[in-house]
Amino acid sequence: MKYKDYYKILGVARDASADDIKKAYRKLARKYHPDVSKEKNAEESFKEVSEAYETLRDPEKRAAFDQLGSHAAGQEFRPPPDWSQHFASGSPFESMGQGGFDDIDLADLLAGLTGGRSRGRAGGRAGAREGPIPGPDYEAMVRITLEQAFHGTEIDLDLSVAEYDERGVAHRVPHRIKVRIPKGVIDGQKLRVPGKGGKGMQGAPPGDLYLDIQVQPHPLFRTSGQDLYVDLPLAPWEAVLGTSVELPTLAGAVSLKVPASTRAGQQLRLAGRGLSRPGGKSGDLFAIVAIVVPTVVNERERSLYRELSESSNFDPRAHFRLGAAA
Amino acid sequence: MNIDTAEALSLDENSEVSFSQLLVLSGLSDNDLRELVDHGALTPINPNASSWMFTSYCVVVARKASRLSRDFELDAHAVSVLLGFVEKIEALESELHALRAGALGHGPPGTSDTVSR
């Protein structure tokens, strides 16, 4: 079992008062709660903070934790020989030998002392002393490519989950789940996989698995909901005269007709070429025009540009004068 | 090893859940869920019906409410206010994201800022 220093996680002294612990938790919860925080690794940090607070706010669990002694964070350790007599009496851990703690998480060990889940179905823990208890829900973040989002995909998820033995003791076990992701999912979308959470106890139903979708940035396409955006560089003469270009889409390249007199920044819409919407029409693909000028021109080109400059009446800054006159 | 493939369901505006399903899925109490509806944090599809139905996106909102209530020790009214702010921030972020996506991602190679005098 790996040691976690709950005092250090909350940034309080080992003799901190209950009030100080609560203040420290609230400060860190405000900083790291995944529903309100934009901090990097907010979810992981909040899980640690929440776990520490769950233990230190409860006098019984805090006393049991204190008796485990002080170790370096992450260090392998086992509870002292007489620990279970004092703190696990009547709990499923009472009969466990010294070798039985290897696959047990510190939080599960301490939660098992008081038995039962204290924090509702979402993310709660099961104990052996209650009636039927629905399985806990699992949550996982899934990173997929834009191509996978467009076509739909199947992913293998490897989770480390708590499974309860016949005494109600939680053991950490690896768990692999294969999930079909529907096409058209977007960045930040939540998906629910019914019945793929933790096992229920005493005939209760299993929990659900919730997936938080993250779509990786694409080298060509940007997304906004189900719409896609791609930059379309054009040479000046292509923008003036119009042209036909091969445009990449997630379903393969298409031929796009660029009308004459196309302006920089103009958005050319390809209807229905975005991500599909569940139960509705697909999003669109927008090609955003950029006029790109050559950085190196030969003598012939320079001469043609000069000729164009002398014969053209086009004034791209006419509005400056109109503005000045007003 | 033979692993069954499970279907992931979108939590969006296109499917529905009942009041009792939302209770189970969110972990909220009956009273808290009704209060969230009273405060406008959740809106049933059929507010005048005897048994409320919700879009399945409400599962995302209700679970968020459950987490905020539990982790910050807030009552339903405070959670509703907080959810309103979170929703506004998310809408602004979404708008900003759309503007960024619609803007040119990469300038032409070799462009640079110039200073005129």
Image: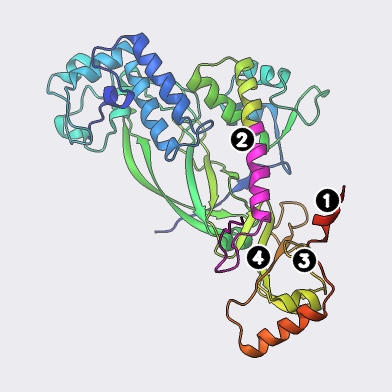
Looking at the image, is mark 3 or mark 1 earlier in the sequence? 3
Neighbour class for label 4 at 10 Å: few (<14), some, many (≥20)? many
Q: Are marks 4 and 3 in contact (CB under 8 Å)?
A: no
- Mark 4–mark 3 distance (CA, rounded to whole Å): 13 Å
Tell me the kind of residue under disc 3.
Arg
Tell me the kind of residue under disc 2.
Val
Q: What secondary structure is marked by label 2?
A: helix
Q: What secondary structure is marked by label 1?
A: helix
Where, by quadrant of the figure, is residue A18 drawn? Answer: top left
> Which residue is tagged 3?
A263
> Which residue is tagged 4?
A231
| Location of the N terminus of chain A (image quadrant) | top left
**Residue A323, label in figure:** 1
Residue A89: give x, y in percent of width and height.
23, 15
Where, by quadrant of the figure, is residue A98 drawn? Answer: top left
Q: Do the residues labelled 2 and 3 touch (CB within 8 Å)?
A: no
Front position among marks 2 and 3: 3
Q: In screen coordinates, is A10 left or right of A291?
A: left
Neighbour class for label 2 at 10 Å: few (<14), some, many (≥20)? many
Looking at the image, is mark 1 or mark 4 earlier in the sequence? 4
> Which residue is tagged 2?
B60
Front position among marks 4 and 2: 4
